[in-house]
Structure formats: C-alpha cells, structure tokens
Amino acid sequence: MRFGIKTIDELKVAGRTILLRVDINLPIDHQSGALKDITRIRAILPTIRELSTGNAKTVILAHQGGDLDYDNLSSLKPHSQVLNEYLNGAAQFVEDICGPTALEAIKRLKPGGILLLENLRYLAEEQTGFERTLRLTPLEQAHTLLVRKLTPLADYFINDAFGTCHRDQPSLCGFPELLPTAMGRLFEKEFCVLSQLTQSPDRPCLFILGGVKVGDSLAVIERLLENNIADRILTGGQLAKFLARATGKKPDNDFPPKGSALRPLWERALDIFKRFGDKVVIPVDFAYVQGGQRVEAARGEIPPNVRTTDIGYQTVKQYSSLIDSAKTVVVNGIMGDFTEPYSMTGTRLVWESLCRTNAFTVLGGGQAISAATKFGQLECFSYISTGGLALILFLTGEELPVIRSLRRGSQLNSKKSPEPFSSQHRRDYVSENLYFLGSKPDKNKS
Ligand code: 3PG
C-alpha cells in the first residue's frame, strides 16, 4: 500500500479480468479529427504493458470530451489506433460501453489481451452536469447500469486516470465499492511526485493559471491562497481577460446582467482581490490582432470591440522576473492563443523563462503541454503531470473523490455484490431528485 491505496504489486493479475480506468481525454483537431497531443496515451503505456505481459485480460475504460467540453466529445476509435501503434496492434476496440457487444468482447478476451471500450461520456451518468446535479453516493454509483453490467465480468478495478481524480462519477468511484481496487503505475508516480510538493514546496511558490473554466479557476485561486500554498498566482488566457474586466469595473445594474452566470463569478473575483490583493497578478497589457498586425495596449487602454488574444510584452517582462526569483512554479493554462502566429509570443516567452529558471517546474493541463510540445520545450520542465484541473486541486491538499474511493476499494479483498437500497433510501433518493421531473419537493412537507 502507498498512501492507503493498493498498487499493482498487491494484485494477482494473471488470467484475471481487469477494468482499467485511464484518462486519455485529448485535444482534437476539429477539421481533420486528428488527435493533437498524445502525451496522455504514452503515459498509460507502462501500466497496460505490465498488465498484458502479466497475462491479465485488460479492459480499458476512458472518456473523451463531455458536457463541459462538447466540441471534443467524440469516439475513442482514433485513440485505439494510436494505442495500437505502440502496442503492435494488440488492442481491440468496440463501439460499445456496457451493451451486448462490449460484454461479448470482454468474455472473449484471452490472457494478455487488451480491449478499449467506447467513450464513457456517451453515458449520461458519466457527464459532469449529471455529477454536479445528482451528487450520487458511492452506493448509488455502484447501482448504475455501467457498474452493474461490467462488475460481474471483472476481478479487479485499477485506476490510472490521475487527470480525472477530481471527478465523482460511476466509472471512477462506483467500481471500488464492489471490486478489489488498486492504482495504476501512472497514478502512483503522480501521487509520489506531487505529494512531496504539497507537503513542503520550496518558496517562493508561484502558480501560473490560465484555464477557460473560470469558475473552477476562481475556486482554485481561493484554496491555494487560503491554505497558504501559493505565494503568488500569475494569470493568463481567458482567466486573465475575465479578471482584468472584473477589476476594471464594479458590477452595475446592467452588467453583468442580474441572474446571468457571469454575475456571481464577477462578484467572487472582486472578493478575491479584496482578500488577497496583489497575490493574484493580472496582466498589465494585452495584445490583439488588427489589420494583420500584432498590436499591444495597456490594460485600461484597450479599444472597445477588439478581442485580445495574448498578454503584452510588459507583462511578459514582469512574469519572467517573478519566475526567475521563484523556487517552485506550477503551470496549468496558457497566456494566449499560442496556435496563431500573432498571439503565440506571450506563451512562448513565458515558457522560455520557465526553461531558464532554476526553480522546480511542474507543467500540467492539455493546452500548457501542447504549447511546450509545439515550442520543443517539453524536456526542460522538471515534471510533466497528466493532470489539468486535477493536478491543481490535488495540490490544494484536499482529498479528491477518486482518491477517497481508491482508499475504500483498497480495503476490499474480494468482489462484493451491490447492497440493495433500503426502501427508505429509495424514497429519499426519489424525493431528492424529483425536480428532474419538473418540481422540487418541499422537504418540510410530510
Ligand atoms: C481533463 O482533461 O481535465 C480530464 O480528462 C477531466 O476532464 P473533464 O474536466 O471533462 O472531466
């Protein structure tokens, strides 16, 4: 056991059927459908190879895109092709998750065989909106169709999806209720390296954030500063644009419109600045493209109706000097649209500073890694994590749902049948969730 979780060393895998949950959620080129960055596929190969050479029957479960990332919600067939390039054609793929075709293919697997099932996010209960609204308990997750169909065919559940450890979904937290569980080699490596960082980061400790999920990023900023983990947070990308607008103007009656999703985020951003002041650093200037040229302007002087696509050069200088004097830097997110020639400068120059610094540098998140790959800088980071939001949330020090569930599943020594819901549980469950049918019951009424 490491960190209260079993590792593969503690399982007898030969001849056994293993459900292996991985995170191979990748950026996709929408015109060609090609996978733009396969780092996450390469990262899970050690676990797959170890299981296959150990004569396990390996059933891989994975997601791609989802309700938060609808543009990338697509089949895992291209992923199976890439897997096969590395595994010499050993991985089969079925366009099914837990229906008859998938079940038949699992039953036919031979020792050493590898099977990838279709995108889990095609199932509603694997969607993030569903997770947030219903907040299923582990027992309820164990009662979903996915878990009930696949568990009888499996001996063990192994989770190697570190990038998804902040999610609370049946494919992650349902199986450990019923199957003896362990973490895969990638999960184990991420856990070891990153937990050292949470315990005593060398200071000053900088975080560079630039995600598009602004609500998630604000929550992360609050936790990193409240728990005194980050000394400073530098912002880029969509997050920086949002914060720059929020600090430039207090909410008024017209904007952000009352009742819009933006308004609570706006108020939350103002509260963060009130509480933490200049610990949250926003760009002093931005760049935009006009008449085919890159133009830069100070934060308060950006003409209305232009769309900024990068940070400006003064910001690059300020960020580079903070990076030079830091001892730890964690990066998740980008400075601007690094795929366009006029907007890549901010990310490229900040990443060059990250390559020059003596600090321990951790890079995570699809876009940040794609930028480093594009600029040929992957080698110069101290550690590349496969986690994006999961990495940052892990570093805030809280016990994430998947880690909690891995610890529970590591206590199981043999397969369990799902315990039936009690009739009271069923009544509570139905009444809690009735609002899906149009009316939320008043709990105070009998
Ligand atoms: C990620 O890319 O961060 C993980 O695969 C999780 O994706 P999600 O945010 O869509 O759950």
Image: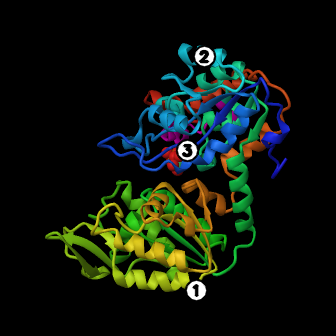
Q: How crowded is mark 2: few (under 14 residues within 10 Å), some or many (20 or more)?
A: some
Q: How crowded is mark 3: few (under 14 residues within 10 Å), some or many (20 or more)?
A: some
* Front one among 26 and 138: 26
* Front one among 243 and 74: 74
The three-letter amino acid code for the residue at tag 1 is Ser
Location of mark 1 (residue): 325
Residue at 25% from the left image edge and 71% from the top image edge: 288
Locate residue 51: give its quadrant.
top right
In terms of secondary structure, where does tag 2 sit?
helix
Residue 340, x across and y down, in percent? 29, 63
In terms of secondary structure, where does tag 1 sit?
loop
Instruction: Mark 2 vs mark 3: give the one in front.
Output: 3
Q: How crowded is mark 1: few (under 14 residues within 10 Å), some or many (20 or more)?
A: some
Residue 98 drawn above or below residue 35: above
The three-letter amino acid code for the residue at tag 3 is Ile
Is 107 placed left or right of 250 in the picture?
Answer: right
Residue 422, x across and y down, in percent? 73, 22
Kindly tell me whether residue 142 is visible in this rendering. Answer: yes
Alpha-carbon span between mark 1 and mark 3: 34 Å
Upstream in sequence: badge 2 or badge 3: 3
Residue at 42% from the left image edge and 85% from the top image edge: 317
Is 12 placed left or right of 239 in the picture?
Answer: right
Residue at 47% from the left image edge and 66% from the top image edge: 268
Which span is picked out in magenta?
A: 127-141
